[in-house]
Image (tube, grey):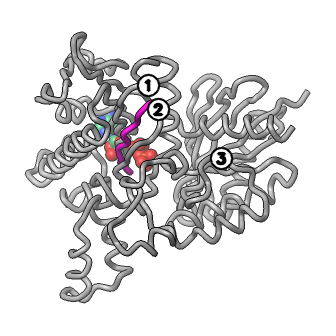
Amino acid sequence: MARPVVLTLNSGSSSLKFGLYDISAEPVELAVGQIERIGSQPRLKARSGVDQTEMLRDLSSADVRDHEGALNMALGMLREQFPDAHAVAVGHRVVHGGVAYTAPVVLTPDVLAELYRLCPFAPLHQPHNLAGVEAALKAFPDALQIACFDTAFHRNQPLVNDVFAIPRKYYDQGVRRYGFHGLSYEYISSELKRVAPLIHAGRVVVAHLGNGASMCGMLGGRSMASTMGFTALDGLPMGTRCGQIDPGVIFYLVQQEGMSIDEVREMFYNESGLKGLSGISNDMRILEKAGTPEANQAIDYFIFRIRRELAGLAAAMGGLDALVFCGGIGENSRFIRYLICEDLDWIGIDIDRERNEANQMVISAHLSRTRVMVIPTNEEIVIARAAKRLLSSAG
Ligand code: ADP
């Protein structure tokens, strides 16, 4: 008998991440993976959720020319491995839900048209997300298609965290602090509720530190404030993104250096952050080993901005009960976590070196007033759960 599954898709500019979940009961991961370098030298990486075996395969660029080719390639692999799977829903990660979408939604033609209208708000991401939707609509015309938004988790923040101090009409037009990484924060909030309900009910800062990096202040499991703003450029410095910057720098680069707006954008998104400051790499593992003054300064800047935002978010919430790390750096780098947390006793943080080295879930000392935790995030399962919920309500 066919078993019901949800396929999750996250399509970026040159990659397609996918997950397959059995939804006979609570969603269970069957496989996750990604096809990278679509259109150039495509490569498939996948991991079985059943026995954790990994697969790495180079693909032909003729077969994987675009997102549709990538989806068909991923589906071929999944069908081989799970011949009894029947996709009843496809859940898409969509970066922007604008002002209106505060929760996952079924993708009807009207909703899809509305999401296309939001492309100018996220021109580097939204069109690729929607290319994934179009490919899935062709491949699964009978499945329920749903969208989960990176902005949704933050949509109920107080006005002071939602607004920029520019003429009001732009706020009304949608120029707001949307905040991103919402699926990751939603997952961390749900995990906290399960493993530490008292902490969940309190004042928590979550630091999602990956190639993209942001922080979110949560009160009672809901977003109060976040470091990302109108776009995913704001806030912390990231692998290649600059983070918070004085807009005057843009005027200088355009007016004095003669750069075009596209060149400035390219530089801020792809040549800045850890890569720009170190001159070596956007990859934290490489910077930790490099030991050059520039690599160390890039790390120092990363740490400094995280600590500054931590204090700011704690002030926004009137205190701090816990700091939670997630994302590739937050989940793995003992070194960076230690540097962030050292000498923070004034905010109640007392990190336990051994627990940190052992990568335990709680890395603060027993008597630390503020708890420090490491929780591996899982954005895909948030999408699978939403799909299951919407399937139930759609009957
Ligand atoms: P993305 O935002 O692309 O999903 P990830 O969450 O996978 O990124 O994080 C990628 C970052 O995590 C890279 O900078 C990588 O170097 C860093 N990272 C992964 N493992 C480690 C580790 N063991 N030590 C330090 N940094 C690590």
Quadrant showing the N terminus: top right
Q: Residue furthest right?
A: 1
**Callout 1 touching callout 2 (CB < 8 Å):** yes
Give the mark toward the camera: 3 or 2.
2
**Residue 179 sits above or below residue 223 on the image:** below
What residue sits right under mark 1 in the picture? Answer: 200
| Magenta-span inclusion, residue 217 | yes
Q: Amino acid at mark 3?
A: Pro
Magenta stretch, residue numbers: 212-221
Residue 221's tag is: 2
Q: Could you say whether the residue bearing mark 2 is in a helix, strand or loop?
A: loop
The Cα–Cα distance between marks 3 and 1, rounded to whole angstroms, is 22 Å
Q: Nearer the viewer, residue 378 or 167?
A: 167
Please rate how many residues cluster around mark 1, counting C-alpha atoms within 10 Å: few if below 14, some from 14 to 19, many from 20: many
| Residue 364 among those drawn in magenta | no
- Ligand 1 falls in quadrant: top left
Q: Main secondary structure of the magenta part?
A: strand
Of 135 and 45, which appears nearest the observer? 135
- Residue name at image x 53 percent, y 42 percent: 183
Q: Name the residue tied to disc 3.
A: 104
Evaluate whether residue 284 shows in this view. Answer: yes
Which is more N-terminal, label 2 or label 3? 3
Q: Where does residue 273 sit, x and y in percent of width and height?
A: 26, 58
Going from N to C along the chain, the mark reached first, 3 or 1, is: 3
In this picture, residue 278 sits left or right of residue 162: left
Between residues 386 and 157, which one lies in front from this camera angle? 157
Pointer 1 or 2: first along the chain? 1
